[in-house]
Image (cartoon, rainbow, N blue to C red):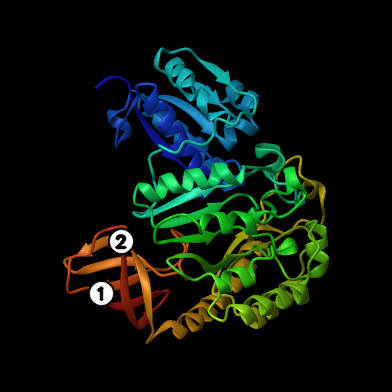
Amino acid sequence: MGKTYFLDPFGCAKNQVDAETLMAYLNDAGWVSVFSPEEADIVVVNSCGFIETAKRESINAVLEHKKNGKRVVLAGCLAERYAKDLFESLIEADVVFGNKDLSKIAPAADAALHGVRTQIVPLPSNGNTRKNRPLLSLPGSAYVKITEGCNNRCSFCSIPFIRGGLKSRQIEDVVDECQTLLDRGVRELCLVGQDIAAFGMDFSGKQLLPALLEALLRLNGKFWVRLLYLHPDHFPPILDFLKENGGAAWVLPYFDIPFQHASESLLQKMSRKGCAEDYLTLLDRIRDVLPDAVIRSTFLLGFPGETDTDVETLLDFQERAHLDWAGCFTYSREENTPAYAMKPRVPKHTAERRKKLVEEKQTAITEKQLERFVGREFDVLVDEEVDEELYLGRMFAQAPEVDGSVVVHANATLKLGSVARCKIIARAGFDLTAEFIR
């Protein structure tokens, strides 16, 4: 079989694109991917270094694979951020490999294979996108990274230390990759980046997301474009375009907008410019133009200085915003960020209690929001076969991995990655039940 590797991926959709790209470079260099670490000559841990829990998971993965006798390459965000420290202290990692130039992964893998302990932290390069990469996403769906890094400098965020400042791809490059993915049978293009609303600002001084969407909708085929991670303080001028372009190629009225909080004083400490009223106005504007629009957001609990009053402000915002989906996480104190030295710190148990409050409130809101789809027909992208004539899929309101599913009862065999027309007949928790029409 030759040289074999097992990829142990971690983290978000952006990390998944990196994992796919690492696999493409390894495959081109003669390595063979296997389905379990037991079969592999080496294990590549594509780590996440964004928050403390993700760091621990990544390090634990290295320790576990080494305990099982494997040679390990620690790659990804954690390796990039702490390369020197990890190389010195985490001796279980045979090679520490940064994420700025993924094309150098083959020499790192070869070093691990031959027992050469080293750290390889390449300088930034454009060699981080591969059209022929394996796809680790759900059938018919693919993530397309259109930006790297971020210029927003939120005070709690370590991304600038890991990924650097904003770097957008050229429109032609993104379009070329998307056409290749469509030719491979992809039906859903999920555009990702730390903040895709800023696409193009680094080299043009303008938000070029509208121009990119126009170019993508000129591609041949029937497909969806899904927008993930739009910063609320500079939401791009795309609403009228989305309203006017709902043909075979369709930009979904689904917006992932991480508000993080609703307390104006806390948002200012986070280095954000908005407030609850600004964000509610944005939501009203979106829904006025696109009445069926689905909004996902995230909230950060336990930020330094957060009070019970701040949490009440957030709960009130939830009630008024009636978001379709929301995720919550507690503050992770990250060195070198402005928030690291901020006080008073919120005890972990208090942050967790507040997080639970917000999650419980969101559960009822999400269930109510989903009710509006019952009795209506939608296209559903088929993700998984559960049983004979029973499938899981997603309609426009459900992003991969993070939202609920559509449970499809079909009197036919459906192809995974295909689009089926279905009628929603009920809601079951965060999922929808549907009957296949055609």
Quarter assignment of residue 431: bottom left
* Residue kind at label 1, given as amino acid type: Arg
Residue 248: % across, % down = 42, 66
Above or below: residue 81 compared with residue 392: above
414 horizontally vs 397: left or right: left
**Residue 429 percent location from the top left of the image:** 41, 77
Nearer to the camera, 44 or 379: 379
Kindly identify the amino acid type of the residue bearing the numbered disc 2. Ser
Q: Earlier in the sequence, mark 2 or mark 1?
A: 2
Within the image, what quadrant is residue 394 found in? bottom left
Q: Left or right: where does residue 271 sit relative to residue 253? A: right
- Disc 2 to disc 1, how far (Cα)? 11 Å
**Residue lying at 18% horizontally and 69% vertically, measured from the top left:** 389
**Residue 74 in the image: above or below residue 182:** above
Vertical relation: 34 (above or below) 395: above
- Looking at the image, can residue 11 be seen? no
Indicate left or right for 362 with 413 as reference.
right
Q: What residue would you read off at disc 1?
A: 438
Q: Quadrant of the N terminus?
A: top left
Q: Residue furthest bottom?
A: 375
Q: Contact, CB < 8 Å: mark 2 with mark 1?
A: no
| Image side of residue 21 versus residue 293, left or right | left
Q: Residues within 10 Å of mark 2 (few under 14, many from 20)?
A: some
Residue nearer the viewer, 328 or 322: 322
Image position, residue 167 (x, y; %): 67, 41
Q: Is residue 393 visible?
A: yes
- Of residues 18 and 402, the one drawn nearer to the viewer in this rendering: 18
Q: Quadrant of residue 228?
A: bottom right
Disc ID at residue 418: 2
